[in-house]
Image (cartoon, helix red, strand yellow):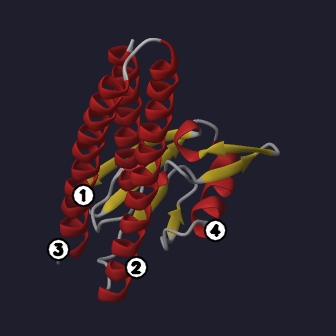
């Protein structure tokens, strides 16, 4: 039973790491990436719709994004959504596609993005710690019925080791992303 609790907690921690990686992909690191637009939503016929569902997003080179909407009437809505987003990008609409040139990042903007990575990392760590707390609570419930106090303590120590491993992985991911952002 405690093994199932630990396995479930480990799977949930993996998902928290996956969510962190997805969040970090949306940060602009100086290179063009379609994932940058994942959180941008355009008002499409009165419904907020993710830009990546309104057309195809291509990166012909490391500094350019091209959005080709499936419905030409969505061009203006996509352009407006990108302008309103916190990405700091200026789209160019030529009537059939939207072209976005990714300018090099300023030092100040790099520092802001580095702070954002830390915020995402802290959220991931909190999620991992909450998962540990839930697992430890489940183990303590078992202690009252099925397992001894010593066994419960041993399983909680193992949960702490698993948590430490995942927190170290978050730190490693953050360090790599910060290095990528600060690269000139």
Rendered residue at 41%/51% (across/down): 124
Find the distance from the CA under tag 3 to the CA under tag 2. 14 Å
Residue 88, compared with residue 136, is above or below; it is below
Mark 2 or mark 4, which has the lower sequence index?
4
Considering the numbered disc 4 on the image, is that residue within a helix, a strand or a loop?
A: helix
Q: Which residue is mark 3?
A: 183
> Which sits earlier in the primary sequence, circle 3 or circle 4?
4
The alpha-carbon separation of the residues under discs 2 and 4 comes to 18 Å
What is the spatial separation of the Cα atoms under label 1 and label 3, in whole angstroms?
18 Å
Find disc 1 in the rendering and name its residue. Answer: 171
Q: Locate residue 144 relative to residue 157 in the image: left or right.
A: right
Q: Mark 1: give few (<14), some (14-19) or many (20+) Cα within 10 Å.
A: some
For label 2, the residue is 112
Give whichever of discs 2 and 1 has the lower sequence position. Answer: 2
Camera-nearest residue between 65 and 180: 180
Image position of 39 (left or right of 113): right
| Residue of label 4 | 84
Q: Are marks 3 and 2 in contact (CB under 8 Å)?
A: no
Q: Position of residue 77 (x, y in %)?
A: 69, 54
Q: Position of residue 171 (x, y in %)?
A: 24, 58
């Amino acid at each position: 039973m405690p093994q199932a609790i630990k396995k479930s907690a480990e799977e949930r921690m993996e998902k928290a790491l996956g969510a962190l990686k997805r969040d970090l992909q949306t940060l602009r690191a100086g290179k063009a990436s379609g994932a940058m637009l994942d959180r941008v939503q355009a008002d499409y016929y009165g419904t907020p719709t993710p830009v990546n569902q309104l057309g195809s997003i291509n990166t012909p080179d490391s500094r350019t994004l091209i959005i080709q909407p499936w419905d030409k009437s969505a061009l203006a809505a996509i352009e407006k959504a990108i302008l309103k987003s916190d990405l700091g990008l200026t789209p160019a609409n030529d009537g059939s596609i939207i072209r976005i040139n990714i300018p090099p990042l300023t030092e100040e903007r790099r520092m802001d993005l580095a702070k954002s990575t830390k915020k995402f990392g802290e959220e991931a760590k909190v999620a991992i710690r909450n998962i540990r707390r839930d697992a430890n609570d489940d183990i303590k419930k078992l202690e009252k019925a099925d397992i001894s106090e010593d066994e419960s303590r041993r399983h909680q120590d193992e949960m702490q080791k698993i948590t430490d491993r995942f927190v170290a992985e978050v730190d490693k991911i953050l360090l790599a992303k910060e290095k990528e952002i600060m690269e000139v």
